[in-house]
Amino acid sequence: MTDLPSHLQEIKRPRKNPIFKQHFKWTPQEDLELIELVKRFGDDNWRYLAKSMNGRNSRQCRERWQYYLNPNLKKDEWTEDEDNLILSKFIELGPRWMQIAKFFEHRTDAMIKNRYHVLQRIMKKEKEIHNNDVISQKKEDTEDYNELDKTDEYFFCDNFEQLIHFEISDSEDPYLWDTFDDCNFMQI
């Protein structure tokens, strides 16, 4: 029969209602039929509408209408305000997409969830680019440090986030140090 061991073959059982487990792509003709049915009968009785759709159940009809065919859906570009609202509501509510969708007009929970994941990918790429820039800058700083003249003194001023270079003769001038009163110096 199959290449499965006998103890696993017994576990495999036929499905009771295989028609509900199969997923067929919607045809343009089915879309037109569903649009006409919704125009005629409304979108509040999906069981009734599904009876007129061969091979489709009420859930399939409802989801096809809500997520793809409904003319009230907003399918244009996402705005920065919408992106910010998604991120703030996700922080507040977590992945409760249906609750988050209540704050949007004409966007579905699935659209919002998909947009959230797009935003996460964008932010991850930006973070990787930033991290690469920081690593690259640290490497340059290390190379610069290795080239420093070892007979001079160098101080790091953490308030200005910069390396300050003094020649030995300059470092004994008392007025020079007054210009850096706000610094917490660390000699390196």
Image (cartoon, rainbow, N blue to C red):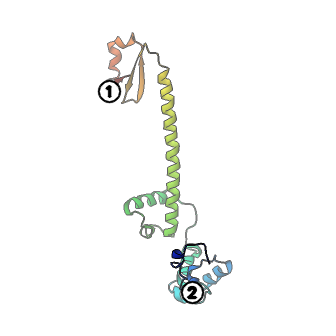
Vertical position of residue 10 compared to residue 97: above or below: below
Q: Is residue 107 visible?
A: no
Give the amino acid type for the residue marked by disc 1 in the picture: Asn
The residue shown at (48%, 58%) is 83
Mark 2 or mark 1, earlier in chain: 2
- Quadrant into which the N terminus falls: bottom right
**Closer to the camera in the image, 3 or 16:** 3
- Please tell me which residue is depicted at 59% across the width and 79% down the height of the picture: 22
Q: How crowded is mark 2: few (under 14 residues within 10 Å), some or many (20 or more)?
A: some
Instruction: Kindly state the secondary structure of the residue where label 2 is placed.
Output: helix
Q: Residues within 10 Å of mark 1 (few under 14, many from 20)?
A: few
- Above or below residue 175? Residue 33 is below
**94 relative to 50, above or below:** above
* Numbered badge on residue 50: 2
Give the residue drawn at x 52%, y 61%: 115
Q: Position of residue 6 (x, y in %)?
A: 54, 76
Residue 35 location (% of width, % of height): 61, 81
User: In terms of depth relative to the viewer, which is nearer, 20 or 184?
Assistant: 20
**Residue at image location 32% in from the left, 27% down from the top:** 184
* 72 lies left or right of 187: right
In three-dimensional space, the C-alpha distance between marks 2 and 1, rounded to whole angstroms, equals 74 Å
> Which sits in the foreground, 17 or 120?
17
Q: 98 or 17: which is nearer to us?
A: 17
Residue 164: horizontal and vertical position, in percent?
41, 22
Q: Residue 184 carries which label?
A: 1
Going by the numbered disc 2, the residue's amino acid type is: Ala
